[in-house]
Amino acid sequence: QVVLVRAGHKVFAIPTVMIEQVQKLKANVLENAYQSGKIEWAGRDYPLHFLSKLIGDNEHQPQVHLYTPVILMRSGAYR
């Protein structure tokens, strides 16, 4: 199973075994997360990155929505 995500005109499939949690954040909560560079969930800090930037697409900027989906990924010891 995978979760499909889109960054600009590209679509990626992320295996669900790599995903800890999918959330929808309100605009003000997301703005606070951008300012702190992380999201806190279940006692852990998750670094916040804009997918387009991670894949080298600097043309696209984050869009403001009432709710924005955010994927918390497993890594290292949390897999």
Image (cartoon, rainbow, N blue to C red):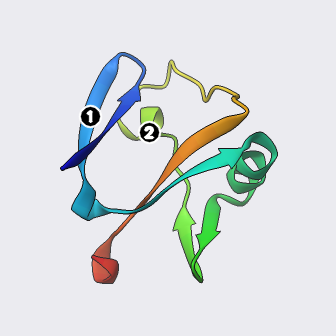
**Mark 1: few, some, or many residues within 10 Å (few <14, many ≥20)?**
few
Judging depth in this view, the residue of 17 and 75 nearest the camera is: 17
The amino acid at mark 1 is: Phe
Callout 2: helix, strand or loop? helix
- The residue depicted at 81 percent of the width and 45 percent of the height is 28
Residue 47, given in percent of the width and then of the height, sits at: 53, 62
- The residue depicted at 29 percent of the width and 27 percent of the height is 11
Q: Quadrant of residue 4?
A: top left
Q: CA distance from mark 1 to mark 2?
A: 10 Å
Q: Are marks 1 and 2 in contact (CB under 8 Å)?
A: yes
Res 12 label: 1
Callout 1: helix, strand or loop? strand
Evaluate whether residue 64 shows in this view: yes
- The residue depicted at 63 percent of the width and 70 percent of the height is 40
Q: Which residue is mark 2?
A: 51
Evaluate whether residue 56 shows in this view: no
Total labels: the figure holds 2
Q: Is residue 37 left or right of residue 57?
A: right
Judging depth in this view, the residue of 63 and 49 nearest the camera is: 63
Residue 38, given in percent of the width and then of the height, sits at: 62, 62
The amino acid at mark 2 is: Leu
